[in-house]
Amino acid sequence: MNRRERLERTIAGEPTDRAPVALWRHWPGDDQRAADLARATVDFQKAYDWDFAKVTPSSSFCLTDYGAQDRWEGSLEGTRVYTKHVVERSLDWTTLRTLDPLRGGLGRQLESVRLICAELGEDVPVIQTIFSPLAQAKNLAGDERLIQHIRTYPDRVHTGLSIIAESIMRFIDALKRLPIAGIFYAIQHASYAVLAEDEYRNFGLPYDRRILEALPSKWWFNMVHLHGHLPMLKLASQYTAQAINWHDRDTEPSLAEGKLMFSGALCGGLSRWEHVHNGTPTAVREAARDALQTLDHRRLILSTGCVAMITSPLSNLRAVRAAVEQS
């Protein structure tokens, strides 16, 4: 069974030769140059033989052309700290411009994806990370300022989100020319720890649906990622995607609860901290076995709820890959 067959049967809830498995991580420093990010992604894929390759650029790849600035300060996640925000006053939301996907940071990312697809070929499904409009808005304004503006200047925030969404749509149009399997759509605010549900239904869900419903039918493997604690997984049925990923080992809902809320594949089963970073190969194997049994060896893509740490033990990464062969 090849990777695509395995993933498609998992999405459909059908039996497979084994569960699909994949990890992904950030590449601080290398994620600032197209060729270096491509090389890192390809080498990681070839080293572990994952069932798909998720392209993980820095979150700023889609924001530098607005004027945002950031740097890596040693985070184990490999994420960067924003040193210059573009939105400081509420009126700044209305002055954002739609970006050209073929230039600047977006153009560099397209080149990186092109290089990755050329190197890995048709046998490895490739999915490109897309950050939701609200996730991008957070990094343009900062966490507190975005939420303050949502609650005090909602119309201006909606103007900014519409412009960001249009830039995303243009980038997706450019991605259609590349032989990818789909996108990894990263949502950061569909969390009861961040916003009330009615706030997310107003400022997040409409833009998410607009983007996801416009994806081309040839993209057969699109994954939604709900970041953080207490995700609004009850909204998952409204997303047009084949798989969903959240921190199932670290927060509610559990995998068992999640399978009742979403009909496609569930991506998770492992804690990136407890199992993959701080644990042992034995702990990884036991957690993987438990996750597979929870879903009766159906509909599970074995992974962590978010990026693996850049310094996690290689023995634990190997154990993740080996776990699906031993199940």
Image (cartoon, helix red, strand yellow):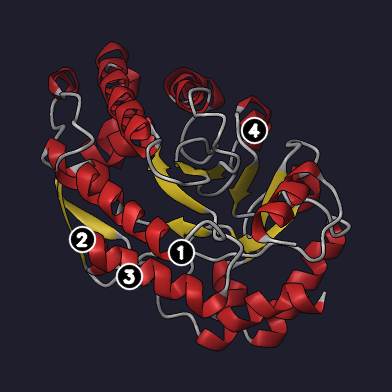
Give how far apart the Cα atoms at labels 4 and 3 are.
Answer: 33 Å
Q: In terms of secondary structure, where does tag 1 sit?
A: helix
Label 2 vs label 1: CA separation? 21 Å
Query: Pointer 2: what residue?
Result: 32
Label 3 Cα neighbours within 10 Å, binned few <14 / some 14-19 / many ≥20: some
- Eye-nearest disc, 4 or 2: 2
4 vs 3, front mark: 3
Position of residue 108 relative to residue 62, above or below, is below
Q: What residue did someone put label 1 on? A: 120
Instruction: Judge from the rendering whether residue 22 lies leftward or rightward of residue 264; answer left or right.
Output: left
Q: Can residue 60 be seen in this snapshot?
A: no
Q: Mark 4 points at which residue?
A: 236
- Give the residue type that dot 4 points to: Ala
Q: Decide which of tag 4 and tag 3 comes sooner along the chain.
A: 3
Q: In which quarter of the image is the C terminus?
A: bottom right
Q: Distance between the residues labelled 3 and 2?
A: 12 Å
> 287 or 182: nearer the eye?
182
Task: Tell me: residue 304, above or below residue 236.
Answer: below
Marks 3 and 1 close (CB-CB < 8 Å): no
Q: What residue type is labelled 2?
A: Gln
Q: Where is residue 269 in the image (x, y as percent from the top left)?
A: 69, 62
Q: Where is residue 16 in the image (x, y as percent from the top left)?
A: 82, 59
Which of the two discs, 2 and 1, sits closer to the camera?
1
The label number, if any, that marks residue 166 in the structure image = none
